[in-house]
DNA sequence: CTCCCGATAT
DNA sequence: ATATCAGGAG
C-alpha cells in the first residue's frame, strides 16, 4: 500500500543483512596498509591517495625502515622522500605535504599525531577521509571513512544517495551503530574491490542483487 | 570545477 | 586508449 510505511523496517532488515553477509564474506576486517604506529599510518594513508595499498606497501616497506616518527622524515628531507615515493603518483604534493606535516607535528604536537578530527584536518594533505581513518584505525575511536570504494558501494546498495563522501559518511553513521563503523568500512572496501568493482562488477556472485541501484 | 600523476587492468 | 586506484587543495 503505502511506500513509506515499511521504510524503517525494510531498512532495518536490509542493513542487518548487509552487515551479516559482509561479515561472512570477509571475517577479518582490517586495513591492508602496513604500519607500526599512528604516525606511520598517517604517512601511509596520505601516500594512498589515488594509488593502491599494494603499491603503498611496496614503498613503505623500505621507507619505514628509516621513518618511524616525524623527526625521521625531516632528517630525510623532501628531495629524498620525493624520490622514494615517485612510483605512487602525485608524488610532489605528497612529499611536500608530508614534510609540512612532520614540521607541524614536531613544532605543535610534541611529535605526536592528534586524535581529533578538527586537529587532523588542519594538516596539509589530510582531508575528511584520511582523518577518519586515523581516528578509527589509528586510535580505535568511532569513525566511518568513505573512500572511493565505500562511496560507490554505499550508493549502489542504496544506503545513501548523497553526492559527496562526507555526506555519505554521515548517512552511514545514522544507519549503523558506532561499534560497527570501522569493521563495516573495511568490509565495504573489500566488497568494492573484489565484487562490487568500479569497472566490471561481479554481479553474478553478489549477495545483494535486490538492493542494487544499477548506477545513478 | 581542475590539477596533481605513476602503475595497473581492461 | 581509457578508467581507476584507501583524495585533497586551489
Image: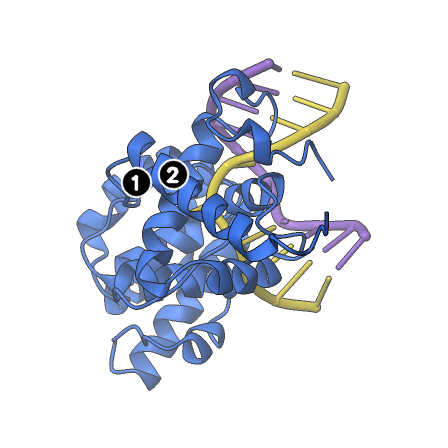
Chain colours: A blue, B purple, C yellow
Residue at 47 percent of width and 52 percent of height: A12
How many neighbours does mark 2 have within 10 angstroms: few (below 14), some (14-19), or many (20 or more)? Answer: some
Q: Nearer the viewer, mark 2 or mark 1?
A: 1
Classify A125 as above or below A13. below
Quadrant of the drawing holding the C terminus of chain A: top right
Circles 2 and 1: CB distance less than 8 Å? yes
Residue at 30 percent of width and 45 percent of height: A31
Classify A77 as above or below A62. below
Q: Can residue A213 be seen in this view?
A: yes
Tell me the subunit letter for badge 1.
A
Quick one: A200 or A72, which is closer to the camera?
A200
Q: Mark 2 points at which residue?
A: A53
Residue A168 in the image: state x and y as whole percent: 58, 57
Q: Between marks 2 and 1, how big is the CA–CA gap?
A: 7 Å
How many neighbours does mark 1 have within 10 angstroms: few (below 14), some (14-19), or many (20 or more)? Answer: few
Classify A66 as above or below A123. above
Mark 2 falls on what kind of element? Answer: helix
Residue at 37 percent of width and 41 percent of height: A187
Q: Mark 1 points at which residue?
A: A32
Looking at the rendered structure, whether the residues under marks 2 and 1 are on a common chain is answered as yes
Splitting the image into 4 quarters, where does residue A71 fall? bottom left
Amino acid at each position: 500500500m503505502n511506500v513509506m510505511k515499511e521504510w524503517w523496517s525494510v531498512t532495518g532488515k536490509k542493513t542487518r543483512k548487509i552487515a551479516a553477509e559482509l561479515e561472512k564474506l570477509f571475517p577479518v576486517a582490517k586495513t591492508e596498509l602496513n604500519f607500526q604506529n599512528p604516525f606511520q599510518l598517517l604517512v601511509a594513508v596520505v601516500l594512498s591517495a589515488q594509488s593502491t595499498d599494494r603499491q603503498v606497501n611496496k614503498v613503505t616497506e623500505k621507507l619505514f625502515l628509516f621513518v618511524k616518527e616525524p623527526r625521521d622524515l625531516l632528517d630525510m628531507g623532501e628531495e629524498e622522500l620525493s624520490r622514494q615515493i615517485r612510483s605512487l603518483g602525485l608524488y610532489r604534493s605528497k612529499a611536500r605535504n608530508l614534510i609540512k606535516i612532520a614540521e607541524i607535528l614536531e613544532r605543535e604536537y610534541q611529535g605526536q599525531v592528534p586524535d581529533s578530527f578538527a586537529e587532523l584536518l588542519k594538516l596539509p594533505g589530510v582531508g575528511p577521509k584520511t582523518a577518519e581513518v586515523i581516528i578509527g584505525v589509528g586510535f580505535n575511536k568511532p569513525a566511518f571513512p568513505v573512500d572511493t570504494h565505500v562511496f560507490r558501494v554505499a550508493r549502489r546498495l542504496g544506503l545513501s544517495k548523497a553526492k559527496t563522501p562526507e555526506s555519505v559518511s554521515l548517512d552511514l553513521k545514522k544507519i549503523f551503530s558506532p561499534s560497527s563503523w570501522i569493521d563495516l568500512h573495511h568490509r565495504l572496501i573489500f566488497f568494492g574491490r573484489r565484487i562490487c568493482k568500479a569497472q566490471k562488477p561481479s554481479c553474478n556472485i553478489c549477495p545483494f542483487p535486490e538492493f542494487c541501484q544499477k548506477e545513478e
